[in-house]
Image (tube, coloured by chain):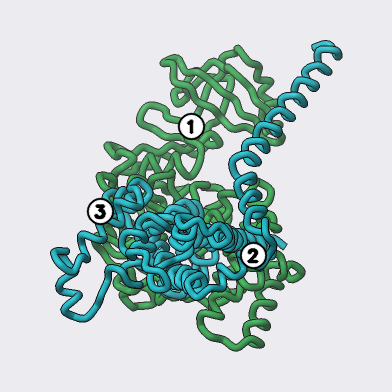
Amino acid sequence: MSSASARSHVASGAVSRWSLRVLGLGFLALLLVAPLVIIFFETFKDGIQPPLDAITSPNGLHALKLSLLMVVIAVPLNTIFGVACALLLVRHKWKGNALIDSVINLPFALSPIVIGLALYLLYSTNDGWFGPTLAEAGLEVLFSVPGMVLASIFVSLPFVVRETVPVLQEIGTEQEQAASTLGANGWQTFWRITLPAIRWGVAYGVVLTTARVLGEFGAVTIVSGSISGKTETLPLFVSKEFERFSEPGAYGASLVLALLALMTLLAMNLLKRKEDA
Amino acid sequence: MGISVEGANKSFGDFQALDDVSIEVPDGSLTALLGPSGSGKSTLLRAIAGLETLDGGRVVIDDEDVSKKPTQKREVGFVFQHYAAFKHMTVYENVGFGLKIRKWDKAKISDRVHELLRLVQLDGLAGRYPSQLSGGQRQRMALARALAVEPQVLLLDEPFGALDAKVRKDLRTWLRHLHDEMHVTTIFVTHDQEEAMDVADQLVVMNNGQVEQTGSADELYEHPANEFVMSFVGEVNRLGDDFVRPHDMEVVLDADDRTKEGLVQRIVTLGFEVRVELVLSDGTEVWAQLTRAELQRLELREGQIAYLRPIQAKSFNGSSPSASQGASTPPGSQDDGEAEVSAAV
């Protein structure tokens, strides 16, 4: 290859590299960043007071608290279930695994609104399968917190499993076997060897689960009835504010949601950096 | 602590990894399980550790049947071919793991870990992570980790298999010295007959899930129970029904009634030793191992005719490599199928 053509080769490499960058960044800017920036500007269009008032209104604060409550309940439960399920899938091979493996993905495949309707049918106090019995026992599932927790768990269930399974497969079983020859029982091996080895997979699953629970709208709308100040999470609050043209409330609450999501991602990055150091 | 395995059976699906295997490992010995891949040697070792569950048979350690005991209660040290280092722990934490599980106090753990790190010559590297060590260092760390808990027995599964030739040789010499100091009953698995003969007091040769023969390196080499053992523990030529080691082949220039005629095909000089490859009149290819001096005396050249005289030959009438006749044979005894033909020169 002559040096001239080699140079032009390098040059065309640089051109394609730059066009890829422009394409990639442009795509991100247009589809992801622009909407968030718009929300930011719209929120503070008339200063900081209107959105602050909307969010600190009793309904706004209640929605925020309820959203965080969903996270606090659904995320730990799905983390425990997800890790246990991943262990079952990877470490204990049996015939039922193929079935579990495909069922786990159901929440990804189903529209959240369908999930909401399914839960509604199960727990309806009139003619649901479980509803009447639970109602007799004094437990109201629909239009209250338990139903919303169920919906949140349902829609965010696959994340931890999906992120943990490949990591478990990758680390193999030798370290666990070594631990057992050194006298560690199953529980000690899990806490001291397996969990530390898979922690980044689990952490990533937790972040995705948290984001999903915070943002869930469709399934929660159906089972909660979206009662202001009672069964309204932040996304439902945003929707309702938007419907009644209360822009500061809608945009302000959206911004809070976006910030929460950002904080989750940031927390994970910080943890990871500390780990690498 | 002696180890014995009695009538062990294990299948993986259609594959029979262990077929009625019994071995006896004397207290304080260093025993090698030697065999080609798929011979069942690793499965047997893992069964002793409890990492595999036997379909049938017993594992007895120090007169106690441990067949039903889980791995963590068998008090065995186990070293894996690929180290199985705890990647998220430092060298110090790796070696101290078993002691921490046993709830030793910090000062005692520190003393013991440093003592072991000195033993395996890693004292300066306590704070490193496994990813910062070489293969040989990782394996020594794994060995220190296994020894830290003062196991009844030490089991090593192809411990040097993943290391390069030089390190492998150093480590096995070092393992032998270590064993001579510690006297812990040790079994190690290898497919390398030279390694086994170099290190072990006792060798157990396995093939197709069965024990072919048990004995010292000398016994196996001098009195192999069958063709498989003979060809696995050293080089071998086949002359009709007879098996002859290349160094038991004399090359002469004059024929007599015991010699066979051959055409010298190739002469390869490997330092002190010379490998002379010949083709016999019936097409059999054989080789003889000579010294340099012998070659010079004979003035052998490629393409000439020479005569072979087997000094010592063995025949195993009707025995096949998979025959299990060697399984229960006491070391060194003569088998029915073995007839030794010795010719004094």
Give the residue type at disc 3. Answer: Gly
Residue B55 image-quadrant placement: bottom left
Let me know if residue B27 appears in the view: no
Tell whether label 1 touches label 2 (CB within 8 Å): no
- Tell me which chain the residue with mark 3 is part of: A
Q: Are marks 1 and 3 in one subunit?
A: no
Q: Which residue is at 55% across, 57% downward?
A: A247
Q: Position of residue A96 (x, y in %)?
A: 25, 53
Classify 10 Å Cα crowding around label 2: few (below 14), some (14-19), many (20 and above): few
Question: What mark, if any, has residue A96 been given in the picture?
Answer: 3
Between circles 2 and 3, the one closer to the viewer is 2
Residue B277 image-quadrant placement: top right
Q: Which residue is at 35% across, 72% downward?
A: A145
Question: What mark, if any, has residue A271 been given in the picture?
Answer: 2
Image vertical order of residue A67 relative to residue A92, above or below: below
- Tell me which chain the residue with mark 2 is part of: A
Give the residue type at disc 2. Answer: Leu
Image vertical order of residue B252 relative to residue A191, above or below: above
Q: Where is residue B186 in the image (x, y as percent from the top left)?
A: 50, 66
Q: What element carries label 2?
A: helix
